[in-house]
Amino acid sequence: MAKIIISCAVTGSAHVPSMSDALPVTPAEIAEQAIEAAKAGAAILHLHARMPEDGRPTGDPAVYREFLPAIHRANDAVINITTGGAVTMTVQERLAAAQRFAPEMCSLNMGSINFSFFPAAARIKTWKHPWEQAYVEGSDDFIFRNTFRDIGYILETMSAAGTRFEHECYDVGHLYNLAHFVDRGLVKPPFFIQMIFGILGGIGPDLDNLLFMKRTADRLFGADNFQWSVLAAGRHQMAFLTQAALLGGHVRVGLEDSLFIERGVLAKSNAEQVQKIVRILHEMGHEPATPAEARVMLGLKGGNKVEF
């Protein structure tokens, strides 16, 4: 029976509070939803922080400190701190929490892309906070910057901490960027590739693209040198993850990636999405990997070697 790593991206930075009442914003909400997602079967918790008063994305380690210890005490899940933060942050701001807390994992975008979600503005009738409308509508002019210098800086900065990465690849070229850093010796197997589909500015959520991304990764790295996972944005989430799991991939769910549980129905929580993908995996004869199993597959340093 194949073991599938389920990651859960709890809140992110693209969705704003006006889009869903279920989106966790305060440290207490983030902690509660992360803990429940782990109980439901998520082995990895991918975490961002938000300002508790209005939900704005923040990279402030002081805000992370308000929820990381509670999550760590409550379960054995692998805690994965973003280095993506938000498109409005500098690379230093995005990396600050990871530097402070030395987690087992960080996310790392493997290149610069247009990163847009402005079409969602037309679906919001009432905005909860003054910052949200300009942020969402203005994303038609957003570029998520991660140059080769930025990526190298993040990899080198976190090397002493023994932190490994969720290498987020939004397009085929990002796989070649990753190969560059493998060649330089800054990334060593076993590494974890998160293939991302359906972001406006990245590769589209088509099965042919998934197959091409996987074949390209196999050719560049050798299938035995990496683990691969898939996330798909919005309405594509569950159907695309099912296809990925059929091909032997790991999966990522969470309110960062989609606010819905089915067509037209908002998810009540991150745990609800985890529970759904667990059911789908069981129907295919798969089992969710435990955190301990995920650590072995990804070569992680262990939850006792973090600084929170």
Image (cartoon, rainbow, N blue to C red):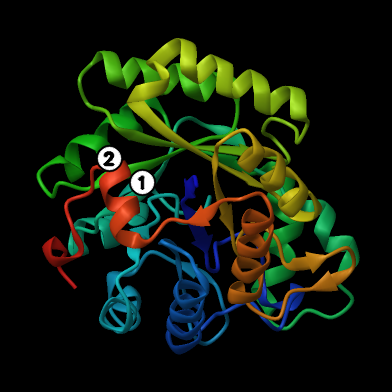
The answer to which of marks 2 and 1 sits earlier in the sequence is 1
Left or right position of 260 against 248: right
Secondary structure under badge 1? helix
Instruction: Specify few, some or many for label 2: CA neighbours under 10 Å numbering under 14, 14-19, or 20 or more.
Output: many
Residue at figure coordinates x 22%, y 26% from the top left: 186
Q: Which mark is residue 154?
A: 2
Residue at figure coordinates x 60%, y 27% from the top left: 171
Residue at figure coordinates x 62%, y 70% from the top left: 275
Please provide percent x and percent y for residue 76. 29, 71
User: How far, Cα to Cα, is label 2 from label 1?
Assistant: 8 Å
Residue at figure coordinates x 60%, y 39% from the top left: 196
219 vs 203: above or below: above
239 vs 249: above or below: below
Disc 2 vs disc 1: Cβ atoms closer than 8 Å? Answer: yes
Amino acid type, label 2: Ile
Q: Is residue 259 visible?
A: yes
Amino acid type, label 1: Val
Q: Which mark is residue 125?
A: none
Please provide percent x and percent y for residue 108. 40, 42
- Name the residue beneath numbered marker 1: 91
Please provide percent x and percent y for residue 230. 58, 42
Please provide percent x and percent y for residue 243. 71, 39
